[in-house]
Image: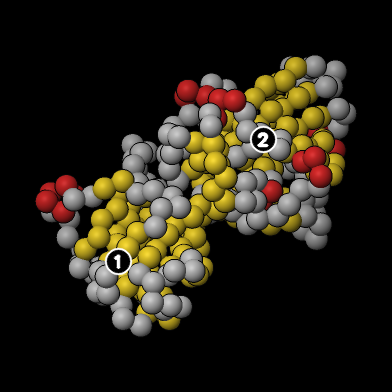
């Protein structure tokens, strides 16, 4: 892989749900989040390689370019038979297939009979589709997810992903990155005592993804209402987006569907 200044100047912004056309022998190279990705088209197959990058908190762009240069030979390659003669490749975002435990870096206390909205930036998965029919080849997380167990015992509970967050209360303070979706989480404390928010189980498989005219990805708002015990809160997913998201289009449906009206059963592990 070349890393010269001239090569970097040829990099362009990448976009979700945008078909790119390759010729046999060409490779599309991507840099986004903590991941480098190479998609190569050959006469009879597609090749996919990826590699993790060191974390860079200042990175905000998804960069891509088309080249004839292949990565280092020691990278693992995944081969896929071409499903048709189409030369198109398209990338779709997806929320994780497991619920995600969100852990604020600093716990947040919500006073009695009060509420707040926190804005969570959720890491996305990339779905790779090719050909004239948009055949799905694979999907991959754009950073290595951490796993955690949520439940009362080792026998009762579920496996979840885990992610740290600043749990920002001001939308303008949330970094807008193309590999993260913004999820507003409204927490209503109806109890007569404060609620300490140390971690929160976000139902990511139930959230759809929407893109606004700025290219930002949003999910519907999640509302959690805690009436008595923290372990029996009610959860609801809005059917539409908040006004601050702007005019949006659906780009990826939720992996799983909620009940009618967005109501989710009382979830005894919302707060871990």
Residue occupied by mark 1: 22
Any part of residue 16 in sight: yes
Q: Is residue 168 left or right of residue 19?
A: right
Q: Is residue 123 left or right of residue 19?
A: right
Instruction: Look at the picture and state if 74 lies above or below 245.
Output: below
Is 28 located above or below residue 148 in the figure?
A: below
> What residue lies at 38% left-to-right and 77% top-to-bottom?
85
Q: In front: 266, or 48?
A: 48
* Tag 1 secondary structure: loop
Residue 2: image quadrant is: bottom left
| Residue drawn at 35 percent across, 83 percent down | 44
Instruction: Confirm or deny contact between disc 2 and disc 1 (CB under 8 A).
Output: no
Give the residue number, with chain letter if any, for mark 2: 240
Where does the image place residue 244, in percent across and percent down from the top left? 56, 25
For the point 70% across and 54% down, the residue is 256
Q: Residue at x 16, y 53 (%)?
A: 7
Residue 76 image offset from top left, x and y in percent: 37, 73
Neighbor class of circle 2 (other Cα within 10 Å; few <14, some 14-19, many 20+) is few
3 left or right, relative to 197: left
Give the mark nearest the N terminus, 2 or 1. 1
Q: Position of residue 253 (x, y in %)?
A: 62, 51
Relative to 147, residue 43 above or below: below
In the shown orientation, is residue 207 left or right of residue 81?
right
Residue 90 occupies which quadrant of the picture?
bottom left
Q: Quadrant of the N terminus?
A: bottom left
Above or below for 87 versus 157: below
Graded by Cα atoms within 10 Å as few (under 14), some (14 to 19) or many (20 or more), the crowding at tag 1 reads some
């Amino acid at each position: 892989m070349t890393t010269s200044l001239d090569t970097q100047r040829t990099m362009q912004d990448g976009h979700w749900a945008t078909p790119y056309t390759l010729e046999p022998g060409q490779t599309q190279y991507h840099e986004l989040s903590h991941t480098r990705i190479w998609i190569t088209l050959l006469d009879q197959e597609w090749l996919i390689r990826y590699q993790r990058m060191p974390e860079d908190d200042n990175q905000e762009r998804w960069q891509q370019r088309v080249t004839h240069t292949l990565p280092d030979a020691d990278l693992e390659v995944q081969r896929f038979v071409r499903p048709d003669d189409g030369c198109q490749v398209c990338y779709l975002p997806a929320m994780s297939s497991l619920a995600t435990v969100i852990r604020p870096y600093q716990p947040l206390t919500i006073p009695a009979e009060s509420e707040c909205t926190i804005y969570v930036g959720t890491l996305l998965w990339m779905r790779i589709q090719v050909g004239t029919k948009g055949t799905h080849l694979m999907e991959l997380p754009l950073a290595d997810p951490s796993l955690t167990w949520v439940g009362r015992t080792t026998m009762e509970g579920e496996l979840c992903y885990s992610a740290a967050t600043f749990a920002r209360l001001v939308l303008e303070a949330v970094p807008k990155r193309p590999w993260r979706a913004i999820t507003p989480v409204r927490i209503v404390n109806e109890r007569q005592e404060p609620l300490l928010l140390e971690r929160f189980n976000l139902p990511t498989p139930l959230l759809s993804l929407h893109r606004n005219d700025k290219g930002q990805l949003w999910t519907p708002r999640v509302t959690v209402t805690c009436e008595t015990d923290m372990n029996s809160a009610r959860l609801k997913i809005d059917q539409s987006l908040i006004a601050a998201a702007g005019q949006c289009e659906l780009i990826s449906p939720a992996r799983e569907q909620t009940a009618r009206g967005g109501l989710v059963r009382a979830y005894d592990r919302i707060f871990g």
